[in-house]
Image (cartoon, helix red, strand yellow):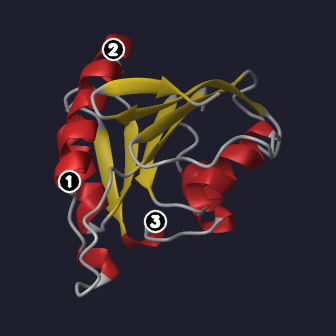
């Protein structure tokens, strides 16, 4: 693997009467993820592997981003990403590491933790909703703690792209 894109789902509704897994995107989350899609389109993602949590809010985030992520990409929807920890996320990524690029769409704290793990930088801000981080690995055979370099970390909020790194 050469590139890893880490995407935290967009802002979810605050309806805590629903099961957390079933919470949908809030109106702001819908808008932010669609704006993020237009930003990511500039990167012209080639066909690649996408791993996506099966929660409603991550599925909706993916639907809003699928144009920029390349609709021909192979997507794997997995329950294992729902509130996954670093070890689980790492194992899922390593299993698919023959892919040139992997995009993962999921939840905190696991996504923020895997970002810190791969970059070896533990002072990186936590991923906010509608955030994307891209990590580059110089040696495609070395995908361990500290082996990646953060290329960018951005957030889409209120029709603006905010750099977080």
Q: How many marks?
A: 3
Residue positioned 33% across, 50% down in the render: 10
Where the N terminus falls, by quadrant?
top right
Q: Is residue 46 visible?
A: no
Q: Label 3: which residue?
A: 81
59 relative to 7, above or below = below
Task: Report how far apart the C-alphas of labels 3 and 1 lie in the structure.
Answer: 15 Å
Q: Nearer the viewer, residue 128 or 38?
A: 128
Q: Earlier in the sequence, mark 2 or mark 3?
A: 2
Task: Report how far apart the C-alphas of labels 2 and 3 lie in the structure.
Answer: 25 Å
Q: Nearer the viewer, residue 72 or 107?
A: 107
Q: Identify the disc placed on residue 60.
A: 1
Indicate the quadrant where residue 158 lies. Answer: top left
The answer to whether residue 40 is left or right of residue 113 is: left
Where the C terminus falls, by quadrant?
top right
The answer to whether residue 110 is left or right of residue 58 is: right
Q: Identify the disc placed on residue 44.
A: 2
Can you give x and y, in whole percent of width and height, for residue 138 in the image? Answer: 74, 21
Can you give x and y, in whole percent of width and height, for residue 92 in the image? Answer: 55, 58
Looking at the rendered image, the disc whose residue lies closer to the viewer, 1 or 2, is: 1
Task: Report how far apart the C-alphas of labels 1 and 2 lie in the structure.
Answer: 21 Å
Can you give x and y, in whole percent of width and height, for residue 40 in the image? Answer: 34, 22
């Amino acid at each position: 693997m050469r590139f890893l894109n880490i995407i935290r789902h967009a802002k979810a509704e605050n309806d805590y009467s629903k099961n957390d897994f079933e919470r949908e995107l809030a109106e702001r989350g819908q808008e932010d993820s669609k704006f993020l899609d237009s930003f990511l389109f500039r990167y012209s993602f080639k066909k690649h592997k996408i791993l996506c949590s099966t929660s409603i809010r991550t599925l909706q985030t993916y639907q809003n981003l699928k144009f920029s992520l390349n609709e021909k990409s192979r997507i794997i929807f997995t329950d294992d990403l729902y509130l996954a920890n670093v070890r689980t996320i790492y194992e899922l990524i390593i299993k698919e590491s023959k892919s040139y690029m992997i995009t993962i769409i999921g939840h905190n704290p696991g996504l923020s933790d895997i970002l810190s793990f791969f970059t070896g930088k533990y002072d990186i801000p936590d991923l906010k909703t509608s955030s994307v981080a891209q990590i580059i690995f110089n040696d495609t055979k070395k995908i361990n703690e500290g082996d990646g370099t953060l290329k960018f970390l951005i957030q889409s909020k209120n029709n603006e792209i905010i750099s977080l790194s």
